[in-house]
Image (spheres, grey):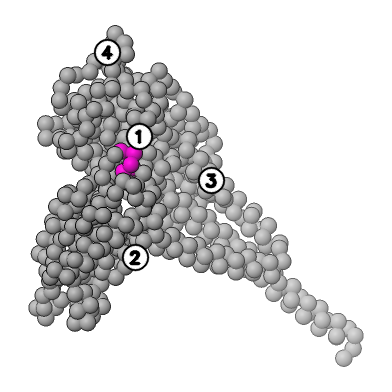
């Protein structure tokens, strides 16, 4: 083979290699663009889900607080002594309870000499011990409070009356108006438009729920959320430099990140900051869609009349992708591998977090959560000079169920029991599945008499249950229950649980399908 022929052949192979490398680079560029688009989509979807979870937590907290307020208000034996410390402070009839160790209560127009009002004040003061719990669950919350039509309010965190007083001006604000029967005749949970706090330095949105008794409207439990905190949350999630905007039904910007012209100190109208073609975009069902020179993501939240918009310029994606194309192919392949591992680790982490505190079958709390909540419940019991009852129960002859009908039927029995326990306990009660067929219920603000009454109700309701297994086979089952009360000098639940367990054993020995009280220590 002469040199010229050999050279032409080598050039041919080099040209082929160049062509293959070029094709590989084009393919790599395309894959990199798609990968970045997918990563952005994942970020936005996760951010939207996390934000929705924050709002669901707030809504759930207000619903729980509303239910708790209702339960407290029904308690006609609630201690009224603390109300006597509420006093008038000026000639206009303003009145306060300025004692951080007790609560933060302010009002106007004079204290009405009424048993109902005194009872309502006592209810709101008893309710404040739950405000701190709600605040810990909702880091975006500025203030949690109860507002009464009888012209007073209790709130958390504590603030002195010389810095804030519940005044007549508050009755004109949306968080009060939307609670009243005039604007909320169905007494539903409400979410306000944006409004400024009294000092004008923060923009807030309020989630609230009216409270009624048999005689009518009492007031509402409310939670104020700071817009700037929601925007800070979006900013922390905005890793790809896009634009996040959350808009309410009035066209106001609830929160934003990367939005030109946005100012968290004022109420912004979205139509002045986003183009009309973006605002006209339909919900995108969890996917980035192409709109002109941008990618767009739109999500409608379930719990609030809010929408999330995410906008990312396509050119930014192309430029960033070209940068990655210039890297060594091995490095790029390794990064793809790392991404896959991160996805797997993220999936595993989410699953572990879900399993950490709950039982996967029944969705009840597990032993780990029991160890976490122990000191909190004991602290509340001592601080409020209240009682705390323990109920232990398990399913009678559960092994026979498994042996006779199989473990799937056994699982169905456990799930049915868990649902019955949730149906017939209060929102403030805490239910655990300790393992197998064994369950535990902690009853705050409840002595042994109340616990025995609840236990008998549970025993009776379970006895009525009927499971149809097919082929016209019907299955009934019963439970045995042991009840005890946590003593004031006990540092944990161990002793009380042991006593309840002994009472449970006594119920088993006494023929099952019984409720037994633990013997005094």
Element assignment for label 1: strand
Measuring from the top left, give residue 93's x and y in whole percent.
27, 13
181 left or right of 273?
A: left
Q: Which range of residues does the magenta coloring cover?
A: 380-384
CA–CA distance in space, label 1 to label 2: 32 Å
Which residue was labeled with disc 1? 144
| Residue occupying the point 21% across, 67% down | 505
Which residue was labeled with disc 4? 93
Q: Residues within 10 Å of mark 2 (few under 14, many from 20)?
A: few
Residue placed farthest to the bottom in the image?
Answer: 1
Name the one closer to the observer, 427 or 41.
427
Which circle, 3 or 1, is nearer the viewer?
1
Displayed quadrant of residue 384: top left
Residue 360 is labelled as 2
> For residue 257: magenta?
no
CA–CA distance in space, label 3 to label 4: 47 Å
Whichever of labels 2 and 4 marks the residue nearer the N terminus, that label is 4
CA–CA distance in space, label 2 to label 3: 31 Å
| Residue occupying the point 19% across, 82% down | 404
CA–CA distance in space, label 3 to label 1: 25 Å
Which residue was labeled with disc 3? 236
CA–CA distance in space, label 2 to label 4: 55 Å
């Amino acid at each position: 083979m002469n040199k010229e022929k050999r050279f032409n052949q080598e050039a041919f192979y080099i040209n082929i290699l160049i062509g293959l490398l070029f094709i590989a680079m084009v393919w790599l560029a395309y894959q990199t663009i798609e990968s970045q688009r997918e990563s952005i989509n994942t970020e936005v979807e996760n951010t939207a889900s996390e934000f929705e979870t924050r709002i669901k937590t707030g809504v759930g907290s207000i619903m729980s607080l509303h239910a708790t307020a209702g339960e407290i208000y029904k308690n006609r034996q609630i201690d009224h002594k603390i109300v006597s410390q509420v006093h008038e402070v000026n000639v206009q009839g303003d009145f306060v309870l300025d004692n951080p160790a007790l609560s933060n209560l302010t009002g106007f127009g004079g204290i009405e000499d009424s048993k109902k009002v005194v009872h309502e004040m006592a209810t709101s003061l008893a309710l404040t011990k739950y405000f701190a719990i709600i605040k810990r669950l909702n880091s975006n919350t500025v203030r949690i409070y109860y507002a009464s039509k009888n012209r007073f309010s209790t709130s958390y965190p504590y603030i002195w009356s010389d810095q804030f007083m519940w005044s007549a001006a508050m009755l004109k604000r949306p968080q009060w108006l939307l609670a009243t029967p005039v604007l909320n005749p169905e007494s539903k949970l409400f979410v306000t438009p944006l409004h400024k706090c009294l000092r004008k330095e923060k923009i807030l949105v309020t989630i609230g729920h009216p409270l009624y008794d048999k005689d009518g409207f009492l007031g509402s439990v409310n939670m104020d959320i700071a817009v700037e905190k929601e925007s800070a949350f979006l900013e922390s999630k905005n890793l790809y430099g896009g634009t996040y905007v959350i808009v309410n039904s009035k066209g106001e910007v609830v929160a934003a990140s990367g939005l030109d012209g946005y100012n968290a100190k004022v109420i912004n109208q979205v139509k002045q900051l986003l183009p009309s073609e973006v605002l006209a975009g339909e919900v995108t069902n969890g996917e980035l869609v192409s709109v002109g020179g941008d990618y767009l993501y739109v999500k409608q939240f379930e719990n609030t009349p809010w929408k999330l918009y995410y906008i990312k310029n396509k050119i930014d994606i192309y430029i960033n992708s070209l940068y990655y194309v210039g890297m060594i192919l091995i490095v790029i392949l390794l990064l793809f591998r790392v991404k896959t591992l991160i996805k797997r680790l993220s999936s595993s982490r989410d699953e572990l977090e879900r399993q950490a505190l709950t039982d996967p079958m029944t969705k009840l709390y597990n032993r780990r959560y029991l160890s976490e909540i122990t000191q909190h419940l004991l602290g509340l019991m001592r601080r409020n000079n209240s009682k705390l009852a323990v109920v232990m129960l398990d399913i009678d002859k559960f092994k026979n169920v498994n042996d006779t009908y199989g473990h799937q039927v056994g699982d169905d029995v456990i799930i049915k029991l868990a649902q019955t326990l949730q149906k017939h306990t209060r929102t403030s009660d805490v239910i655990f599945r300790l393992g197998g067929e064994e369950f535990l219920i902690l009853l705050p603000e409840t002595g042994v008499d109340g616990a025995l009454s609840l236990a008998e109700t549970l025993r009776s309701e379970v006895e009525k249950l009927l499971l149809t297994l097919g082929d016209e086979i019907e299955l009934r089952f019963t439970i045995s229950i042991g009840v005890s009360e946590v003593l004031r000098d006990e540092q944990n639940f161990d002793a009380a649980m042991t006593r309840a367990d002994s009472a449970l054993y006594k119920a088993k020995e006494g023929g099952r399908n019984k409720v037994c009280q633990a013997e005094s220590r």
